[in-house]
Image: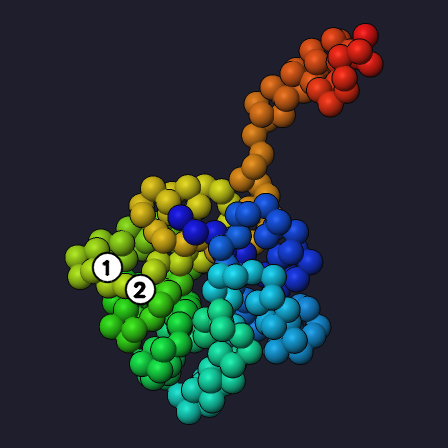
Amino acid sequence: MKFFIDTADVAEIRDLASTGMVDGVTTNPSLIAKSGRPIAEVIAEICDVVDGPVSAEVTATDHETMLREGRYLRGIADNIAVKVPLTVDGLKTCKVLADEGTAVNVTLCFSPAQALLAAKAGAAFISPFVGRLDDIGTEGMGLIAEIVEIYGAYDFATEILVASVRGPHHVVEAAKLGADVSTLPPAVLRAMYNHPLTDKGLAAFMADWAKTGQSILAPESDAA
């Protein structure tokens, strides 16, 4: 499974990319707004930090303006994936951009029917929002299972990008179901490292090692 980071905070992206765990980045208008910076400037900087796909979202709602915005965004860098909403106009825009060779991330997916339409429109990624479904009492991972089944039956090339991830449990369940990508808030990726038994075990190892008075890097003669 690939890990994308869901943020427009360049410092966060740079820090997490240094771990080797980051395969791409997703942004949206809300995340860009938090940065307080021009969208093209932020997206260009992110694209310099990561080699993988960087999703940059259109803000228009009509097809013609979406298309103009999408063409502008893809010109920022070679690794841009233009992000469009799962609406009629969004899917029309997806089809045109995909036919032009642009990777498109279709976002705000909440049903398997929508996911099927996105795949037929040529989306490179479909972004089902599992956390928001959980919030209204629907099992978000059930949607992922349905999309995996549908896409597998027809060998669609569209990658399933699990979004609205609320914790490591969503990532693990998505991986078990065979989703291609999870896009994670920075805090969720960091939480995946943590386990109390890891901390306890490491503390015990370090305490035992300290009693030896040794240093791995010091010559044996100096350690005496």
Cα distance, mark 2 to mark 1?
8 Å
> Which residue appears at 75% of the width and 12% of the height?
220
Q: How many marks?
A: 2
Residue at the farthest bottom position: 64
Residue 30 can be seen in this image: no
Q: Are marks 2 and 1 in contact (CB under 8 Å)?
A: yes
Question: Is residue 128 toward the left or the right of residue 221 in the image?
Answer: left
Q: Position of residue 70 (x, y in %)?
A: 47, 82
> Which residue appears at 28% of the width and 51% of the height?
145
Q: Which mark, residue 158?
A: 2
Question: Is residue 166 toward the left or the right of residue 64 in the image?
Answer: right
Q: Which residue is mark 1?
A: 151
Query: Hey, what amino acid is under mark 2?
Result: Thr
Q: Position of residue 219 (x, y in %)?
A: 76, 17
Query: Hey, what amino acid is under mark 1?
Result: Tyr
- Mark 2 or mark 1: which comes first in sequence? 1
